[in-house]
Image: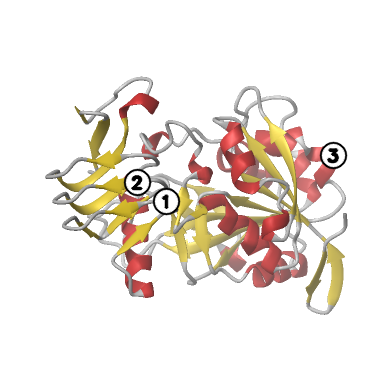
Amino acid sequence: MNNLTLISGVTTTMRAMILAAGFGTRLWPLTEDRTKPAIPFFNKPLIAYAAEYLASYGIRDLIVNLHHEPDSVRAALGDGSRFGVRIDYSFEEEILGTSGALDRVREQLTGSDFVVINGKIVTTIDLSKAIEEHRARNAIATLVLRPNTARERFSVVETGNEGRIIKFGGFPTQDDNSRVTPLMFTGVQVLSPRIFDFIPRGRFSHSTSDVYPKAIEAGESVIAHVSGEDWFELSTLSRYLEVSRLFMRKRGVNMVQGEGSVIEPGASVTGSVLWNNVVVEGGARLSSVVVGDDVRIPAGSVVEHAVIVRRDIVKEVERGRVAGENLIVPIL
């Protein structure tokens, strides 16, 4: 199926790949029975936001790579028709990394420029501007960056003349006295099929450590497109709760309540996210809590700043405490 995208008056075909094969270890225990992109965000699978984002730019022919709990993504997206796209799945027996994933489906991506996006983000970045710049400069790769004003733990991307990317560094430090705001990679990128000249065949590889540095060394244009538009990454428990609460404030609500969830009279739930089929019994109090599917919160319980899931879905308790039928893990 061809996707027609109008960029600067020129109609072209484009495909995209959504990266969704990660283990989601920093979101444990929410990822015990599903992969990170399959967790709900405001009662919709997180990866659905990426699919709808691409569809809004006319890119409707997608590939999604899978590894950890693959059926959770298949259940979340299906064939993609609900979100205005068509999806092919690429299952990795062994996880292949961000560019190894592209190698596995290179035959499907060699026809024209394509987009790659992480399945764990929600964004309003103007993708058409990145595509326009990519084509105007005949770049091999255009990475969408944004200023990391809070100096969060995202790798620093260094740029030089004409916005060319020079190298990928370590994390910024809070005590850095430099007045220059570091730039970070958003996980949104536009690629030329020429990138496959630098992706090793049939093995694990990462784009920022194994591929882009080689392309830069070879003199190829790996460029930065800097955007200040909204971008939210939900790969840790604290970020998931923080972004959920930010969206609650924007929408004027005090909680997110999933399908089939019940808050009994006398219970108090504030600043919290309830997934599906949760029961909060009378007298229980939840504040800044994320509650997984099918959890019952007993009467009189008081929980703050934590994740609660059913104990019986967890294979091994890595941290937190067991309380009756539930596992309670603090959000640090």
What separation in Å lies between label 1 and label 3 (alpha carbons)? 44 Å
Amino acid carrying label 3: it is Glu
User: Which kind of residue does numbered mark 1 sit on?
Assistant: Gly
Query: Viewed as shown, does residue 286 lie left or right of 259?
Result: left
Coloring scheme used: secondary structure
Q: Residues within 10 Å of mark 2 (few under 14, many from 20)?
A: many
Q: Please name the residue that numbered disc 1 is placed on.
A: 260
The answer to whether one can see residue 287 in this image is yes
Work out whether residue 268 or residue 126 is closer to the camera in this orientation and state it: 268
Label whose residue precedes the other's in the sequence (1 or 3): 3
Looking at the image, the residue that sits furthest to the top is 316
Q: Residue 105: x, y in percent?
A: 77, 37
Q: Residue at x 51, y 49 (%)?
A: 120
* Residue 294 horizontal/vertical position (percent): 38, 39
Residue that badge 2 annotates: 278
Residue 264 x/y as whole percent: 24, 54
* Distance from the alpha carbon under mark 3 to that under mark 2: 44 Å
Does the CB distance between marks 1 and 2 fall below 8 Å? Answer: yes
Q: Nearer the viewer, mark 1 or mark 3?
A: 1
Quadrant location, the C terminus? top left
The structure residue drawn at horizontal position 48% and vertical position 71%, both measured from the top left corner, is 228
For label 1, the SS is: loop
In terms of image quadrants, where is residue 181?
bottom left
